[in-house]
Amino acid sequence: MNVLLLIDTLNRGGAETHLLTLAEQLCRNGVTVTVASCGGTLEYSLAQTGATTLHFTAPLRAAGVLPNARWLRRLLRTQHVDIIHAHTRRTALLCRLATLRPLPLPPSAAPLASTYRRRGLRRALQPLRVVTAHAKFAPRCRSLSFWGDATVAVSEDIRAHLQTAFALPAQRATVIPNGIDLALFRPSSQPHDPTTLRLTFASRLDADCSMVAEQLLSLAPRLAAACRERGARLQLTILGGGDRLERLRALAAQIEARADVPRVLLPGGVDDPWCCFSQSDVFVGVSRAALEALACGCTVVLAGNEGYGGVLHPQDFFRHAKTNFCCRNLPPPTEEKLLAALCALMDQPASQKETERATLRALVEQHCSAEQMGARTLALYRAQLRQRRRLCVAVVGYFGRGNLGDQAILRQLRRRFQNAEVPSSLAAATPRSRLPSTADPPLRLQLCVLSAQHKKESTPTVEGLPALPRGSLWRRLMLLCRADALLLGGGTLLQNASRHGNRSLLYYLSLLLLARLCGCPASLRANGVGPLRGAWARALTGFALRGAADISLRESASAHLLRRCGIPTSRLSLCPDPVLDTQAEDAAITLRRLASVGLDRHTRYLCIIPRPIDSAQQTALISLARAAAEAQGLTCLLLPLSPQEDGDVCRSLARVLGAKILCCPDEQAAAGVLRRAAAVLSLRLHGLILARGGSADLTALAIPSTAPKLRSFVQEYGGTYREL
């Protein structure tokens, strides 16, 4: 997985430290990380994590956004970036501008371009855009705010703010708290001097973050006096850089001029804050710095420009975690509140303070560790990629009518393709090649079925797959406009010799032609073709199939017919019927199924698989069945593969032959019954296929519409062929 992290600068701050920690954790998990920014003091630390650092072409001001957007788009075109993760509003806008137009397909996707819609491939392979919100933002620039395909909020109140102020859908926002590197931020092994109160404040020293620092400087004389009353001395350290640093240094110099006030340290921004935190007794501040101080074993007083939370106790941890320990919506801090809290801490027993510090560090380790933040972010990446990296394949066939053979084809297609990695060909029995991808997870398929539904039924799924009614022209057109490929999934679909006549042939040919008009590539998998009656039928079939991406046929007779229709031999391939892979159900279950119709384990039976036929053909079938049953002493058993279509003929045959009727729920059950039969008379191809592998004598009984496929099966796999 290749991740690009975007941020304005790499100077020390909460968002920058968050990005540094995230980059380190992603690199440890085997992710390739690149960071783009305007540079800063954290570049060296970032290089130690294994991440690559790039610099924008211009400073991230208003005038530099467009040049940087062009630079970022060129970068995305040359490198296969799976995820762009922006950590500020400005870089999020930059990401949006760079991806306004879909990026071109990578060279590795070229083998897929003929089988799947190019627009769908570009959509599925576009970089995932993730934006992290580290604070609340004013909605006045709402039109320029971009929150990506997925948004990360570092606290619950920020997520709620994004939903109310920016109308961000709830399902797009995920809370992932700040992560602290506990190996770096840890308590000092050296004991603290009980005669010194080491007080530390850390934050950006800008106008919106420095109020508490000024209050601490003003309090320094009174704090020093309170310490002397308790036999201790004060050591005050203020960490951070910003616009107010020099002003605070001047104020500190004025305070230090008094003889009774110790020196105040203002070193500015430091690269090793963990050293200061681990040597401190009390930390005053908010947000990520407060978590880092907790990890170092400090007692924390939550106070910042947004509010005052007081001394942080274990029972208050989760309440303040909802605001990222920033005290939002709380009363503002005052010098009196700070003085009272610090004096109370000095009076608190040492054993109680140590117990609370250990408990708070354990809570940080349990809920806010860097490893957890990295794992949650990586899980978000993978979940979003899994949702995005899907190609929709519309599957067409004689599905939804209860025909066991056709439903078996659909179940085999579902097992083979649903959620499978995208093959370069939908027609081949095994994929010839796959898309070489560095992403995790890879590109996968999502099937949608055109199903034959009755008017009074409303079935949203067929065999666990989303389904649309095949009779609605509008639904068919919309599906072909959205789908990335069309798959004729098996069976003898392209023929006009059945009882449906030309309607069936024209229906499937119209789907192929509509798919070509909609730009949706079509493939045939293990299809049978024919008979095609009439020169116009052969000409129209050839015209419709010339635009197909792949043509895979079930038997050589269909290939010969398509060559007569003008399809070159190089475009045709043979693929066995997917139902040939069916395994029979357990023998004990089959015996119980046979016992339900009065056949025990010792009864030898002739299994008849009918289909709708005329009276003359029915008379011929009865004669053949009687002769076969009397010659071998067999009991007749009728096994309809399509109960809705075969019900009338089954009842008629049962009256004349005295046969039992057994309906099976699926192809495994039918295979179990057929493979235990002494003989099989089948008018349906899938009856012969399911019976193959048993010890039964197979006889294919053909009518004109089924003669080619039954003859081809007998020639390929053996058995007896007869025409009714």
Image (cartoon, rainbow, N blue to C red):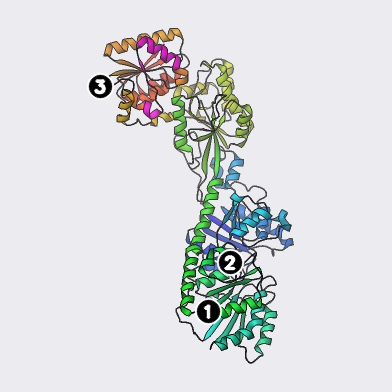
Q: Disc number at residue 281? A: 1
At numbered mark 1, what does the secondary structure look like: helix, strand or loop? loop
| Mark 2 neighbour density, 10 Å: few (under 14) some (14–19) many (20 or more) | many
Residue type of the residue flagged with mark 2? Phe
Q: Is 660 colored magenta in this rendering?
A: yes
Dividing the picture into quadrants, the one containing residue 628 is top left
> Regarding mark 2 in the picture, which secondary structure is present there?
loop
Q: Would residue 441 be found to the left or right of residue 657 on screen?
A: right
Using a 10 Å C-alpha cutoff, classify the residue at mark 1 as few (fewer than 14 neighbours), some (14 to 19) or many (20 or more). Answer: many
Residue at 64% x, 86% y is 221
Left or right: 183 as drawn, with respect to 332: left
Camera-side residue: 365 or 321? 321
Q: Position of residue 698 (x, y in %)?
A: 34, 19
Whichever of callouts 3 and 1 sits on the residue coming sooner in the sequence is 1
Work out how far the residue at label 3 is from the one at label 2, CA to CA, in angstroms. Answer: 78 Å
Q: Which of marks 2 and 3 precedes in the sequence? A: 2
Which residue does the numbered mark 2 point to in the structure image?
325
User: 125 or 300: nearer the eye?
Assistant: 300
Where residue 470 sits: x, y (%)?
57, 27
Question: Is 81 above or below relative to 624?
Answer: below
Label 3 sits on residue:
602
Mark 1 residue type: Asp
Compute the Cα span from label 3 to label 1. Answer: 88 Å
- Judged by its main secondary structure, the magenta piece is helix
